[in-house]
Amino acid sequence: MRRDVFSAAHEDFRELVRDVVAEEVVPRYAEWEKAGRLPRSFFERLGALGMLGMAVPEEYGGGGRPDYRYNVVLQEEAARALVTLGTVRTQLDVVLPYFLAHADRGQRARWFPGLVSGTLLTAVAMTEPGTGSDLAGIRTTAVRDADAYVLNGAKTFITGGLLADLVIVVARTSRDPGDRRAGLTLLVVEDGMAGFTRGRVLDKMGIRTQDTVELAFDGVRVPVANRLGEEGRAFSYLSHNLPQERMTVAVGSVAQARAALDTTVAYVKEREVLGTPGASSQNTKFELAAVAAEVEAAQAVLDRAVLELVDGRLSGADAAKVKLFCSETQARTVDRCLQLFGGYGYLPEHPIARLYADARVTRIYAGTSEVMKVIIAKSLGL
């Protein structure tokens, strides 16, 4: 179906991204998977091309175009090439919005040029051992002491935390027995601060170029000048950004589902089963026809939601619906596609195996499918 989401400027950007992915990502991707991370030099290369600062105001070296569709293009082109750029996506789609919305002029002058150039890498530390999706249950504390906060606690499953120069930490600065969501604050911890340590690099089953680590904070003195926004307002800030975070997962889900379909169609045209082309089998045709219809439906839902997000009209409940539908569609797609590869689909050398492993987490992070259902049910008055 024809898509009406992108302008000529977005398509020009797409050509640039496609070239960069083909020339600088695909040839090195296996090496990056073994290393378990994207190299800093790649971020700096993207920064030099202007790809990290599209949403940042021009006065700080950015493009001055806060249009989420550029982020969509980046994800789509990576998926088309059968790769993922998880930590890039996290920096642009999840972390940068907090800086754009809540950094004061001094913080912008300190950090924005490095964010644009790719010399400052970021992460956001919300999840804690035992808390999962329950942000109101955060136990990391930050106690005000003169011109600093003394930060203590631990975080886990932190994407990009291994190389991050700036980590936005969600910490509890006060407690209100009547409101568990009150009293949370965003503090920016900088690499090298005393008491800030990185723990295990977690060995995941998928998205292996995306480093995921544990972080610990033992009496870290974080200057008040590193607080993002107002004290005690973090829960509302997090809630405001969650629709885009969930849309980011949905965008990747649909792009990777489409990539799985395309690579499977190409494979069955070449594969022979019992002396005949795999594509001639009615079962193969029916399976891929059903997958194609479902992916197209997910794309239509997603494109509508992207436009609503750009216009500032996407509700939290609608973002939850899109994330739920698209991630579940991705799961069904990669499973049915892998089946058509037979035993070869179970070998890591085939991209479909990587797509299968990468897909599993989309129903977990940015809120599990079960949490999405709770949000949707509440919107129905249930």
Image (cartoon, grey):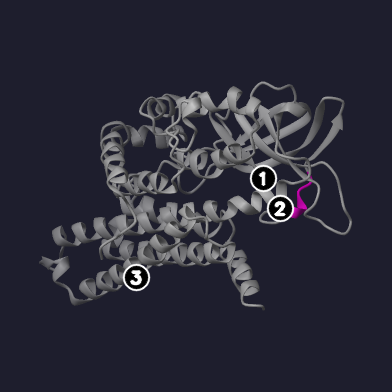
Q: Disc 2 marks which amino acid?
A: Leu
Q: Tell me where residue 267 sits by quadrant.
A: bottom left
Q: Main secondary structure of the magenta part?
A: helix
Q: Which residue does the numbered mark 2 point to in the structure image?
A: 135
Q: Quadrant of the N terminus?
A: bottom left
Is 34 colored magenta in this rendering?
A: no
- How far apart are the alpha carbons under marks 2 and 1? 7 Å
Toward the right, the furthest residue is 177
Question: In screen coordinates, is 361 left or right of 333?
Answer: right
Q: Disc 3 marks which amino acid?
A: Glu
Position above or below: 67 against 25:
below
Question: In screen coordinates, is 39 left or right of 239?
Answer: left
Magenta span: 135-139
Q: Considering depth in this image, is 64 or 80 the residue closer to the camera? A: 64
| Residue at disc 1, secondary structure | loop
| Crowding at mark 2 (Cα within 10 Å: few <14, some 14-19, many 20+) | some
Q: Which residue does the numbered mark 3 point to in the structure image?
A: 294
Asked if the residue at tag 1 contacts the one at tag 2, i.e. Cβ–Cβ closer than 8 Å, the answer is: yes
User: Is tag 2's residue or tag 1's residue first in the polypeptide sequence?
Assistant: 1
Q: Considering depth in this image, is 200 or 325 the residue closer to the camera? A: 325
User: Is tag 3's residue or tag 1's residue first in the polypeptide sequence?
Assistant: 1
Q: Which residue does the numbered mark 1 point to in the structure image?
A: 126
| Residue at disc 2, secondary structure | helix
Question: In screen coordinates, is 95 left or right of 327?
Answer: right
Q: Considering depth in this image, is 131 or 315 the residue closer to the camera? A: 315
Is 138 colored magenta in this rendering?
A: yes
| Crowding at mark 1 (Cα within 10 Å: few <14, some 14-19, many 20+) | many
Q: Considering depth in this image, is 223 or 171 the residue closer to the camera? A: 223
